[in-house]
Amino acid sequence: MLDYVDLEADLDAEERLIRDTAREFVEEEVKPVIADHYEAGTFPTELIAKMGELGFYGPTLEAQGLPGVSETAYGLLMQELEAGDSGIRSMASVQGALVMYPIAEYGSPAQRERWLPALEDGEAVGCFGLTEPEHGSNPAAMETTAEPARDGDGYVLDGEKTWITNAPIADVAVVWAREQSDGEIRGFLVETDREGVSTLHIEDKLSMRASVSGRIELQNVSVPAENRLPGVSGMKGPLSCLTQARYGIAWGAVGAARDCFETARTYATDREQFGGPIARFQLQQENLAEMATQITTSQLLAHRLAALKQRGDLRPQQVSMAKRNNVRMAREQARVAREMLGGNGITTDYPPMRHLANMETVYTYEGTHDIHSLILGEDLTGIAAFD
């Protein structure tokens, strides 16, 4: 696998084990089935428990006996999973970074005890309810409300969330809502079998087809007071979760690009035209050289983020730079790889076209490319381009 400047030479034994375990899982469990699932628009739900057994959910966390592996190990895990498919990485990323993380960081002891072991094992599936139909890039304008119950015990939630990964198969949703008593944004753990909760599947996607996307409708949903996340209020809660997830995306995009590169390199050395392999042509070598260079620079950025995160110095703006750069890179390299495969590149026999389509979603979700540009612009100039 491409590691042109020997970054992985510095991995410790645990990091190598996690990388190799994830890589083997993808080769044996994901790649043989993912094209069929992509065509069918389904997620391989049979892999959920398997990923739990392998420790793929929330491994950097330490609450409730979670292993607390290094940030580099987690990044490598996301890289290998997205080499299989963005939908596989997205499932693990949502489960760990967007559901387990806020419970571990902001939840009560009872909430951690109730949910973290089940989510870690894959016995329960979680989702993250932030985006709304009218409020994507501006989640602070959310309209979902949390009214204190008239009997004084708990809350009543009303609203709608959309483009929620895992929603149709989730057992619990971390729902962010505006508490009407003080206008603050707060998080609530909402079991999806509660009366008034509907989780609806979003059909007819042309990207991320092997991922479960849905809507959450909340109509007079009663939740007890103990379901509110007690440790955070305001936009700090959901935004801190997104920082965790975006970090994983920055690594995952490298995995998708690397899979495209390896596919193109193998194809170019095997495919013969005009009396020899097409890899002997200067144009193809230029493509491979540029792909390897772009992937390597993105790997360097991801590894640097891991070092900063491990010592507690990582800033959200740095994550925005990596998410923005690495996803754009993966999108561009997937296109180049598809071109190198010619007509064969548009079939499900080869992964670049699937990765390319997936990157159109990854380019947009968890902060669009443009929004991350503005986040960086404000950080660099001190002037906000949006309120």
Image: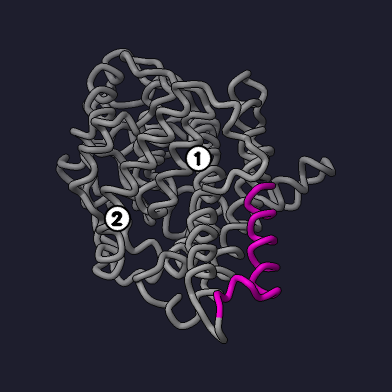
Range of the magenta residues?
276-297
Q: Position of residue 322 (x, y in %)?
A: 64, 44
Q: Is residue 168 above or below residue 332?
A: above
Residue type beneath disc 1: Gly
Side of 211 relative to 170 (left or right): right
Instruction: Locate residue 278: give its quadrant.
Output: bottom right
Q: Is residue 157 above or below residue 202?
A: above
Instruction: Locate residue 351: give its quadrant.
Output: bottom left
Q: Position of residue 22 (x, y in %)?
A: 37, 38
Instruction: Locate residue 382: give its quadrant.
Output: top right
Residue type beneath disc 2: Val
Q: Secondary structure at mark 2?
A: loop
Q: Which residue is mark 2?
A: 212
Residue displayed at 81% across by 45% down? 383
Decide which of 69, 125 is in the foreground and name it.
69
Q: Which residue is mark 1?
A: 248
Main SS of the magenta segment? Answer: helix
Residue 283 in magenta? yes
Asked whether residue 331 appears in the rendered view, the answer is yes
Decide which of 328, 242 is in the foreground and name it.
328
| Separation (CA) of disc 1 from disc 2 | 18 Å
Side of 10 relative to 260 (left or right): right
Closer to the chain start, of discs 1 and 2, is 2
